[in-house]
Image (tube, rainbow, N blue to C red):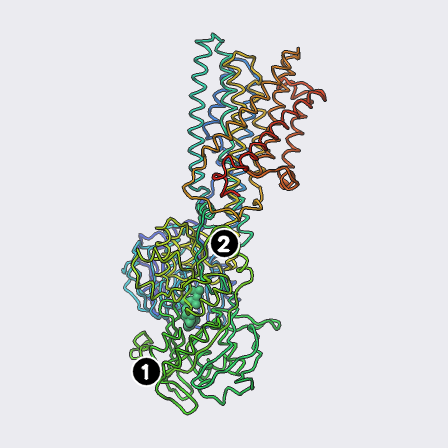
Amino acid sequence: MCYIVLAHTYLSCSKQEIEPQHHPPYGGIQLKAVDRTDPCPTFLWHTLTQAEIEQTLKTGSAGLNAAEVSQRIKQYGPNRLSTQKRRGVLFRLFMQFHNILLYVMLGAAVITALLGHWIDTGVLLAAVVINAIIGFIQEGKAEAALDAIRAMLSPRATVIRNGKKHEVNAENLVPGDWVILVAGDRVPADLRLVSTTELRIDEAALTGESVSVEKNTDTAQAATPLGDRYGMAYSGTVVVYGMGTGIVIATGSMTELGKINQLLTGIQSLTTPLLRQIDGFGRVLAIVIIALCVITFILGTMWRNIAPAEMFLMVVALAASAIPEGLPAIMTVTLAIGVQRMARRNAIIRRLPAVEALGSVTVICSDKTGTLTRNEMTVQRIICAGHIFDVGGTGYSPVGDFSKEGRIIDPDHYPALSMAIRTGVLCNEARLCEENGQWSVEGDPTEGALLVAGNKAGFHQHIADAAWPRVGSIPFDSRHRFMATYHRDSDGEPWIFVKGAPERILEICSMQLDDDGERPLVADYWHRKASRTAASGLRLLGLACKRATPAKEHLDFSDVESGYTLLALVGIIDPPREEAVQAIAECHRAGIQVKMITGDHEETARTIGAQLNIGIGKKAMSGADIALVDDAQLRRIVLQVDVFARASPEHKLRLVQALQEDSQVVAMTGDGVNDAPALKKANVGVAMGMKGTEAAKEASDIVLADDNFATIVNAVREGRTVYDNIKKFILFMLPTNGGEALVVIAAILFELTLPLTPAQVLWINMVTSSTLGLALAFEPAERNIMSRRPRPPEEPLLSGFFIWRVLMVSMLMMGCTLFLFLWELNHGTSIESARTIAVSTIVMAEIFYLVNSRYIFASVMNREGLTGNYYVLISIVICIALQFAYTEIPLLQAIFQSTSLSILEWLKVLCAGLLIFFIAELEKMALRAGIAPARIQHMR
Ligand code: ATP
């Protein structure tokens, strides 16, 4: 009987934590408790052998079956770390009041109450509450958008269940599951390893140790620290090399990672450098405005001898009108809407600053396979010594004939061909599946293509696996560019099969197989054939074999160095994506360079590049050439070359660095674990959602759900739109606040009757800021957005032009309002009516200026400009309705001392709005006509 060591009792665990362990499947094994200080029960799994683990968890090499899985899911719960505790609804609402402006307004409410101005107090309090509620709703919306995106990033795991490989959502793993790990995977649960091939794991997430650990299947002493338990793989750590299989021993919060309650890096909170910059700007502005108010108050009371109570009301009005309180909330919403739009178009943003960086990308470096091409591979040609065979059929449907010079042949009559087909099927990790007559591939499409060719020749995977059982393997890695497997045939004879990049395979071959048996290799023949086939755009693989056993117990690199017999070169077609061709043309129009960095053959890369309009008439550069030049030379060359072939992840890193040193803003795609450094270094790291590893996704800023190049370009468009919309919003908001503030300041300076009371200023803010400005967050991309140059990243948001526009519109609003107000007063209108006209003028001016603000430089005097944003129209209707209510409803008349306006008065208000609208359009026209062409050049 074996002794399983059980740590402590469950008593000290919280109910939720211990629930999964209430009925552990001990399988009749006697348990022994140790270490009574450990608060949670822990099996010392690292001390147990595979047999003991299998017995304990009632599992075996075929994995669990569906019934066992569903029973265990119920018993142990999903394999998920409890997410960070959300702030409660009340707490979040309460936090909305934690804002310098609201403090000022609350302070003012207290003072107005002490002064007995109850209506002002009421309006101030109403404004505070409405602001907080709007902020609360907007924050909730933005958080919900991010939550939905977080859910799209849930990791996957490969398990063996019922004797078959499946890809499942990592949340569905249960103890006893058999999990397969390959390079780039994030370990999805705590595993006891039962087989490893050169498996190395980066455990920094758990132990902080940055050097990866070589894993094996050994047991360890009970007291062995976490980092030295080589037979274990822990949830959250990353496989950096090799492959392995392990049995799940703990999931969710019972994993080591769960116990230290450390969440893995997910999407960060809603902020970016730009938002922080604007937030800071808003705060400085608020302080300056408060200082101004204090000075005005002192001047008014001491110099002009205005009563302090009256003066106080004036400065409250000034503060309320000048502070742009909606700024941070609306910008957060603009960003969240952009992120949501990108997700809808398959670009999932992991780090928000990427949204801004996307808008200024100047170079996109893209992989070829699957991103620029369709990744639907078909073997078209097989070149053996002395024969070239064509393979019929397209896609994954295994229908097609082998032919030679136009005549259909039987592959079995050509020994090298049939051996090559066999190698392709055996040295393979993919699976060909059929469902309702539809064929698909699980795994690498290159390998899928070889399985399809095998099926066409009658050599099916299940037959091959049974007749030639696999004993060991070296997985494919884009750094060594080959894969090898070790098998025994039905006579027990050992075979090693390899497939990989032709140059790599030729290096290890000394013989070739032809119709009469093995002959010495004629390397020249193969090199010529490889270049010619690649030049027709086909992707190339070399296939070779050797009758030998590995030198050591396991197959390793020393077994793939020499003595192989070359069987064939395989040419695989992978056509370019049509949408990529269009997207590249769009990039060129948008001033963005596209560079293709691929692991493929130089000729293949050049031909596919030409089909996509990348690097035409320019030289291609190989990874070997990159290795030969130093950084300074590379910096010079990198802008001249668009196609980089046989490039490895290290080369990608150097290319990003060289481009960045040239002040380029680089978006770089990647999928493998080794791409992580380049993805991190790039301004926008883009990982592939479908074929990308978890390690690549984690290092990236964006994940492409469809692996498609066109999606990057869509994301660039959205990035530019978000930036535009933030600018548009600021350009709308600052002058509207400025206009109101100037009205109040002018009245104080010139000792005029105050055209707006504090309550009225707050009304304007409530009605316009919350309804009108928000509409700009929904602005669609401008039509010319992708014909502009990329935005220089160092370009300040608040430029001289911005200040000009803000001042111009502020002055216009002040001018119109004061003019109408004074005109009415001089013509004997009551102060109430004159003020109602002043308030309506500002509201109307903001409505018209909102339409102007839809385009910063372009004219809005066209159908698209006037009606193109549905939200703008809705918010205008709401705003007009509210303003009618303000003038017509007796309750509001009583609160705000407003009056009804006659048609003539409304017409005057309308004229003021139209005047501002046309002057703003004239200013744009003047700018477009050349007063500031350089400034707007990249906006057009
Ligand atoms: P990209 O970098 O654009 O995605 P790629 O897929 O061609 O292009 P790699 O995956 O690094 O780049 O492949 C490099 C070469 O390795 C390929 O050209 C091919 O010859 C070989 N190769 C690709 N996949 C396999 C595989 N599964 N097994 C063996 N060799 C492979």
> Which residue occupies the foreground of this view, 315 or 434?
315
Q: Nearer the viewer, mark 2 or mark 1?
A: 2
- Give above or below for 203 relative to 117: below
The answer to which image quadrant residue 554 occupies is: bottom left
Give above or below for 139 relative to 131: below
Task: Name the one closer to the observer, 771 or 719.
Answer: 719
Q: Position of residue 207 (x, y in %)?
A: 31, 55
Whether residue 359 is visible, yes or no, is yes
Q: Residue at x 50, y 20 (%)?
A: 318
Helix, strand or loop status at disc 2: helix
Circle on res. 244 = none
Residue 415 image point, x, y percent = 45, 88
Q: Which residue is mark 1?
A: 563
Q: Is residue 179 visible?
A: no
Q: Quadrant of the N terminus?
A: bottom left
Q: What type is the residue that disc 2 sits on? A: His
Q: Nearer the viewer, residue 54 or 191?
A: 191
- On the image, the x and y values in percent for residue 648 come to 37, 64
Task: Point out which mark residue 588 bears.
Answer: 2
Q: Is residue 17 placed above or below 825 in the rendered structure? A: below
**Looking at the picture, which amino acid does disc 1 mark?**
Gly
